[in-house]
Amino acid sequence: MFSAPTDKQITQGYEHAREVYGALGVDVDAAMDRLASIPVSLHCWQGDDVGGFESLSSASGGGIQATGNYPGKAVTPEQLRQDAAKALSLIPGKHRFNIHAMYAETGGVKVERDALEPAHFQNWIDWAKAQGVGVDFNPTCFAHPKADDGFTLSSYDAGIRQFWIDHCIASRKIGAAFGKALNNPCVTNLWIPDGYKDVPVDRNRSRELLRDALDAVFAEAIDPSENLDAVESKLFGIGSESCVIGSHEFYMGYALSRKKLLCLDAGHFHPTEVISDKISSVLAFLDEILLHVSRGVRWDSDHVIMLTDEIRAIAEEIIRNNFESRVHIGLDFFDASINRLAAWVIGTRVMVKALLIALLEPTNHLRELEKSGNYTARLALLEEVKTLPFGAVWNYYCVKQNVPPAGAWMLDIQRYEKEVLALRG
């Protein structure tokens, strides 16, 4: 079912592609070198259905739901790290790993989220060092008794608010510990599920409470070489269909006024909105942003990303404008209906592939056509570019990065499923 091209086929295909792209003024070798410098952050929660390690039961909640029951799920930190390492070995380039607070390892001792410390993530630090990857982090403000009514940092209960403020403060310190230990800044992203199922009377007061709570969370300055703070909006959620306190406008204003990163999640807007159109708008005013790239199907359903027009458009916005140093690319999907390890690899390879396609675009020529008003030629060239042999460059890049090319990586996944995943209870 799956077969890999031979080394000869890969080399011949690449030489032909280099000539084709060269005729358009594209330096294919330079494009691959630039691609190798762009990391994508893989999310830990794809590997265990957003379960975490606080208990043996699934910790998902707060509008988060992984569907399916494919065998072989990671149920221990060791298994999750093993699977993640395998996934990273099948993805070209050097990437990152994104961890939620509920993946702490406390040695069987109950530690409340507001009391978490860097020591509870030492195994993750050691693993990241061994893998040579940077780490990103998230406070877990859902799937907890103190979030059962759907409110955390904007709760009217001062005690509830303080608990989550303290948890987020602890999370920033954990993020900074990752950044310091790995000599690579950690992006700590804050998302909360707060909102109303039905239309509220005083949404303003809820947003005042959230603003003040965030100010308390971020009161202590942290060296940006260790930790970068991001805030993430949402249009709606399960249980917050009528009003999300942390809306896009709220967090855009907060990020602008407090100099934080704004997180744009591909599934957190109206179905007719796309984040590719928002990237240059917010970067006209912000230094850096975070992306959570996913694929919503009719709602924020976090499907594994495919090489859709929107994924390509996101990559094009980043590459055309030389934004790769200002845009932190993270993934956010979870699918338990297919091999979880394959989901990681498929989605990440798609994101990297989209970046390569954008890098192979004759952007300067297209810009000149646009500036001169020759929109006919611009459209014609954009359409012709779609059928150029980027797949041949992709296979060559994979081999150059010492990972399997098209087809071959899935054979590796099938072996791993048979030898490792199938043996899990």
Image (cartoon, grey):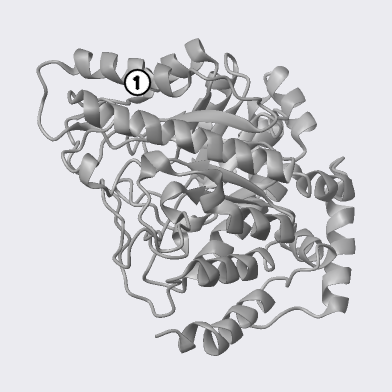
Relative to residue 379, is residue 66 depicted above or below? below
Q: Residue at x 43, y 24 (%)?
A: 217
Relative to residue 153, is residue 61 depicted above or below? below
x and y, in percent, of residue 73 in the image: 42, 73
x and y, in percent, of residue 341 in the image: 53, 70
Q: Nearer the viewer, residue 134 or 373?
A: 134
Q: Please indicate whether residue 393 sits to the left or right of residue 346 in the image.
A: right
Q: Please indicate whether residue 134 sits to the left or right of residue 279 in the image.
A: right
Q: Residue at x 85, y 48 (%)?
A: 33
Where, quadrant-wise, is the N terminus in this rendering?
bottom right
Image quarter for residue 152? top left
Q: Nearer the viewer, residue 291 or 25?
A: 291
Residue 385 visible in rendering: no
Q: Residue at x 63, y 82 (%)?
A: 411
Image quarter for residue 398? bottom right
x and y, in percent, of residue 324 in the image: 70, 35
Q: Looking at numbered disc 1 in the image, what kind of residue is underneath it?
A: Ala
Question: Could you classify mark 1 by the number of other residues whose Cα lies within 10 Å: few (under 14), some (14-19), or many (20 or more)?
Answer: many
Residue at the spot of label 1: 213
Q: How many marks?
A: 1
Q: Nearer the viewer, residue 332 or 398?
A: 332
Relative to residue 230, is residue 50 depicted above or below? below
Image quarter for residue 265? top left
Where, quadrant-wise, is the C terminus in this rendering?
bottom left
Q: Which secondary structure, mark 1? A: helix
Give the farthest residue toward the front: 109
Q: Nearer the viewer, residue 385 or 299?
A: 299
Residue 119 visible in rendering: yes
